[in-house]
Amino acid sequence: MIQQKWWKEEVIYQIYPRSFKDSTGNGIGDLRGIISKMDYLKELGVDIIWMSPVYPSPNDDNGYDISDYRNIHPEFGTMADFDELLAGLHQRGMRLIMDLVVNHSSDEHEWFKKSRESKDNPYRDYYIWKPGKNGGPPNNWQSFFGGSAWKHDEKTDEYFLHLFTKKQPDLNWENPKVRQEVYDLIKFWLDKGIDGFRMDVIPLISKRLEFADTALPSFGEIVEKVYSNGPKVHEYINEMYETVLKHYDIMTVGEGPGISKDVGLKYVGHDRGELNMIFHLDTMFLGFGPGGKFDPVPYDWSDVKRIFREWYEAMGDSGWVSIFLDNHDFPRMVSRFGNDDHYRNESAKLLAMLVLTLRGTACIYQGSEMGMTNVHFDSIEDYRDVETLNFYKEYIEKGVSSEDFLKMVHEYGRDNVRTPIQWDATHHGGFTKGTPWIKVNPNYPAINAEEVLKDKNSIFYWYKNLLAYRKKNKTLVYGEWKEIKQTSENLYVYERFDTDNHYYIVLNHSDVEETFELNLDNHQLDFQNVKNNDLSHLKPWEARLYKRK
Ligand code: ISL
C-alpha cells in the first residue's frame, strides 16, 4: 500500500532569489521582493516554496558557496525579513524549504580560513587535504566546472579537493565534528520553523578514500561511479535522519547527480530512514556527451518517456521522486522539451500537464507559469554563470570559436534560467528599478506576468486550474500509472487509476497533427489546451486530460 504524505500531494515552486524580484533597486532579487509576491504565489496555487541559497556567500557560484550557514546575505535582506517571509507563507497555507549545501562550503567560510592556516590546525580535517603527486595534484579528478578538482595551497604546500569551483572546497564528512556541525545547522533552521530542505549534491558527501585516478571515459560515468554513492553515503544520511530530521514534520529532497534508478531506493525507500524523495537528473543530463553539456550528443522524446517509465518502475510503492523538467541549472523546459517559437503557449501547457500528472511531487521552476524561454545573448560579456565562463576559457584555448561555443550556451547554459522574472512590460520587465545583475530576456514585452494574469486562457491559469484539479483528484497523486503505447512516438498517452477513479492523459509532443487510439466512451474531457472540435485528431502540441464518468 502506498503511504499517504503531505509532501506527495503538495506541489513545489522553486525560487531563484537573485532573479525573482528586486525590492531595493540594486539589481539583485531579494527576500522583500519575494514577500511582495506571496499573494501571486498563492493565486497560482503552489504549496511549497523552495528557495535557492540566501546565505552569506562570495557568490562564486551564486550562493552555492556558503560562507556562513546561519545568516542571510545582506544583499538578500535580514533575518527579520526571512522571519517575515516564513510567517507570511505559513499564514497563507504555504511552506518554505531551504537549500542545504553541505558537500562543500565557500573557501571564505571561517572553517576553511582556519583549515588552510596550518597542518595541525584543529580545523584542518574539516576539509580534504592531500600532498601532491609527481609535482602535480593528488589524482586526475576533474571538477564539474572544468579543470582539476584539486587546488594547491602555498601556505602548507598541500592540495585541497573541490569537486566544484576552486572557491567551493569539499567538506570532510569522515570527520564526526563536521557532521555534528551540519546537524546543528540543520537544527538551527528547523527550529526556526522551516518545512524542510533540498539537499544539494547529497550523494557526493562520502568520498572514496583511495582517491585513485580514474580511467573512465565519460564525465557522467565518473560522477556516478567515482564521486557519487560513496561507501558511507547511506550511513551519513541515516545518521542525519536519526540525529535531527526525524524529530520534525518536514520534507527532504536530495539532489542527485549520479543517483541512477538502480540505487534510487537506497536513498528514498520509505523504510530506510534517509530522504523523502530525490531530484534525479537522468532527464536533465540527456544530450550530455562524454565531456558533459558542452559536448552534446543527440537524444529524443522517447528517451524522456523511457526515463519516466524506468523510474516509476524502480520506485514502485516503496519510494518517491520529484517530477520536473527544469531548474536553475538546466535550460527552460519550453525551450528544451517544447517549441518556444510557434507553439510556445501550447507546448508550455502540455509540459505543465505532464509534470502535474506523472507520479511524483511536481516541482515548477519560477517563470514556467508565464512560459519564459531560454535567452540568446550574443556576447560572452552578458553571461554570469561560473560554469559557462570557465568552459568558455577552456574551449577558446582549445581553438573553438566564440560563436560556436555560444551556440551551445544558448542551448544548455545555466543562465538560460537565471535571467530575471518578467513581471510586466516596463523597463527590465519590472524586475528592478536599477540595473539587473544579469540582463533581462529581451522578450519581456510579450512574455510577462501581467500579460498572463490578464488572460484567463493563459499558461498561468492553465497551471492554476490543473493545480486545483490535482488537489481534488488524489488519484493523480497516488494512483498507479501505465503508459499506453501508440503508433507514433510523438504521442505520450498514459493512464492514472485506482479502484475508484480513472484518467487518461493524451499528449501530442510534436509540431504535426496526430491520431491516437483509446476507447473514451466512458470518459469526459476535463482539460484541453487548444481549440479543436475534431476529437479524433490531436493538433500540434495538443494536451488533454480525460476522467471516467
Ligand atoms: O549544472 C550541472 C551541469 O552543468 C550539474 O551537473 C550541477 O552541477 C549538479 O547538478 C550539481 O548542482 C548543484 O550543485 C552545484 C551548484 O552549482 C548547482 O547550482 C546546484 O544545483 C554546486 O553546489
Image: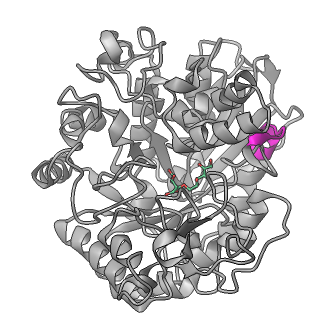
Q: Would you identify the image quadrant in which residue 189 lies?
A: bottom left
Q: Is residue 341 magenta?
A: no
Quarter occupied by the C terminus: top right
Q: Position of residue 96 (x, y in %)?
A: 29, 55
Q: Would you identify the image quadrant in which residue 131 lies?
A: bottom right
Quarter occupied by the N terminus: bottom right
User: What stretch of residues is rendered in magenta?
Assistant: 294-304
Pick the residue in front: 310 or 125. Answer: 125
Please determine whether, in this image, residue 263 is positioned above or below residue 88: below
Pick the residue in front: 58 or 477. Answer: 58
Scheme of image coloration:
one colour
Please determine whether, in this image, residue 342 is positioned above or below residue 193: above
Q: Residue at x 57, y 75 (%)?
A: 267
Image position of 97 (left or right of 224): left
Q: Position of residue 133 (x, y in %)?
A: 71, 78
Q: Residue at x 32, y 62 (%)?
A: 67
Image position of 522 (left or right of 328): right
Q: Position of residue 319 (x, y in %)?
A: 58, 70
Q: Is residue 545 visible?
A: yes
Q: Residue at x 39, y 32 (%)?
A: 464
Pick the residue in front: 430 or 471. Answer: 430
Q: Residue at x 57, y 32 (%)?
A: 332
Please determine whether, in this image, residue 508 is positioned above or below residue 311: above
Q: Is residue 350 visible?
A: no
Residue at the far right in the pictured view: 487
